[in-house]
Image (cartoon, grey):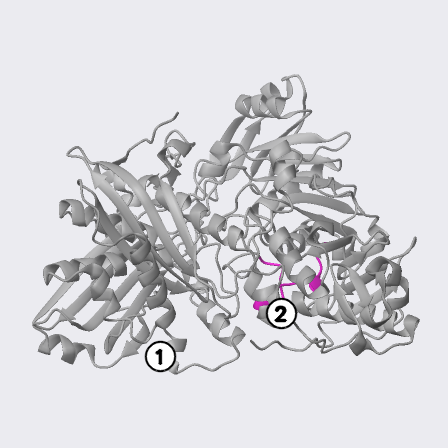
Amino acid sequence: MEFSELTRRQFLRVSAIAGGGLLVACGGGGGGGGSNSGNPGDGTNEPIDAQEYAVGEFLRLSTDNRVHILVGASEIGQGALTSMAMIVAEELDVDWEMVTAEHSPVAARFNNPYFGGLLQFTVASATTRGYFDTQRQIGAAVRQMLIQAAADRWEVTRESLRTDRGFVYDDANGRSASYGELAEEAASYRVPLTPPLKEPSQYRIIGQSKQRNDAAAKVTGALQYGIDVDLPGMLTAVIARPPRFFGQALTVDDNAALAIPGVREVHTTPAGVAVVADDYWSAEKGRQALEVRWNELLAGRTDSDLTRSAYELRLNLPGVPIRIDGLVPVAQLAAAEVRSADYYFPFQAHAAMEPLNVTVDYDGSRADIWTGSQSPTLDKTFASIILGLLPNQINFHTMSSGGGFGRRGNVFADYVRDACFVARAVRQPVKVMWTREDDMKGGFYRPAAAVRVSAAVDNQGNITAWTHRAVTQDVTAILYAEELLDTLAEGTLPPLKELTDLETGMPYDIDNVLMDAHLTVNLTMPALWMRSVNKYTDVFAQETFIDEVAARYSRDPYQYRRGMLNNEPRLLAVLDAAAQAANWGGPNGGRSQGLAVLGHWMSYVAQVVELSVSADKVVTIHRVISAVDVGTAVNPDLVVAQVESAIVFALTSVFYGEITLNDGVVQQSNYDDYPVLRMFETPEMETIVLPSEHAPGGVGELGVPALGPALVNAIFAATGETVRELPLSKLGYRIAERSRS
């Protein structure tokens, strides 16, 4: 494994701190601004005086040998505060039990190198991939400085010393010193730019299933999310929003609202009409009492049925070429058969458990903002513009999020902008709350999509040509650049066909491939990436159609895939591991199996679903087996947790996920008409993490795209029915409940 050197942009700053100890600041970008002072805390750590970390990413060594690490990535349930701290702690060689972590300030030095060091952005399964090298170099550099301090104190060579669990040892002379004892001396040394890094065989923290740093606080309820922030004198606001996107308030009668006890003010904002009150219930009652006439001349009129018709029509027209291999028309003419299938996928809501919320304390000259965010750099930038402040006049506190799935990574910072407009009018602490209904109807959904795939097949059932055409909203095009970032991160220039293979990452050995896409533009329908992005739709079509072709020629789906993965050894390995663990082909007693594979985010997954289907379409999922290769698994337990949480997320999407619009009005409003998977519907799951010394891959989205096709392939095996659209509930399928005992 190769690692880049610490550059002048990835610098360390070292200084002694009051009371003893060592302050180390580092990062992947220039610029400054902002601190984390005033954070209500996450329930896991005592707050630290802001002056101790005014700029830069840092770790703090205390005289009691405790290590405190600030993490630039957002904690949205995936365990970033644990895994990022583990990487630093490994190279620093400290006792893991003495390590704590919290979110960093929002400043350029904390930006994710995966995004060119330009943003703090927790999307695209890029946290570990982006920060891994830099985090290791931070720990290794500080460790070298501590060794040098001990060598000079004892007048011995560095090479004669070793470290272990936060101590430097001089074995020849039988003495030792803790990092805390050496910290102040180490602060005076020049920072090594190319510190030696451990070999993977030397890891004792990386690769171990360490307990999450926030586990105890979650269990006790002490962990603070954005929705928990409570400040002295804080008001609460809710916003009456137009029934159609981008409508504007034409007239507002607020007399009845202001008559509600506790309601303080009513303000018209770009998002709608804000009712500000002493508490949430007063604000909500005030909103219900408002009388608003809406100007909907420029409002969105997206209609689900019309969208589907338009997308299906576009499937008949050539799109923008994405990948061209070989001569598809010639291969189709020579084929024994050409089969095709069309698929359709509706809009879907992110439906996170914690509704959107932002708290802003703005007095005209400075501001503090608290919220769960996947894109704090952009959120802080928009806040700065709206509030008329310089970035260093804003303390942006990134809170742990009760789910994000892409919704809190909005490049337009919609919910933060809304709160800042309210705060600008109120000029005292105010929390702007979204109800569940606001969240469900508030826009920025997974875009609807239509896909057509075709396979040219010879007499033996071998696929000789493949076409894939996708129609979706333009937001997905942004993610088509993701694979380019992956290849640049690997430091190699791939062949042109690999560089342009951007929509499915289709891995099979097929000589003739044509992929194209229609990227539609609908400025009045807010759409956004959602966990696994376009892979959810494209891989579904690809993997279910592979099974159809295999069945047509009486080929086993597992062996059929094996024969087309000669050039993908890592994908073949997870396929074999999942099939073996699932005892592929062995179930009886009315059980059927389906599988699917995916290679993306520099990781690989194969999933097998075992189920049975009753005559009235009740699906009993007996178990889900996943095998993953994520490269270096920093914390295998976190990998398993993410994959299995993705299975739950995917089952929700596959069975229930549908947002419908009638003349621009969203029809769903809460979990009663947009259900999410419940605990008693969740199947047994087994996840196998294959050992690997490859660079870390992404995990957060990995378990989503293959689950749907594996499930549907099992339904196909059980019933012979092909599934060409989602959700399954629309086709009459229901998921069986497990015992609630």
171 or 83: nearer the viewer: 171
- Whether residue 197 is visible to the viewer of this picture, yes or no, is yes
Q: Residue 528 or 129: which is nearer the viewer?
A: 129
Label 1, label 2: how far apart the Cα atoms are? 28 Å
Which of label 1 and label 2 is nearer to you? 2
In x, y percent, where is residue 520? 36, 59
Amino acid carrying label 2: it is Asp
User: Residue 44: which disc?
Assistant: none
Mark 1 falls on what kind of element? Answer: helix
27 versus 497 height, above or below: above
What range is drawn magenta here?
105-121
In percent of the image, x 54 and y 52: which residue is there? 409
Q: Is residue 40 above or below residue 196?
A: above
Residue assigned mark 2: 133
Q: Residue at x 35, y 72 (%)?
A: 569
Q: Which mark is residue 497?
A: 1
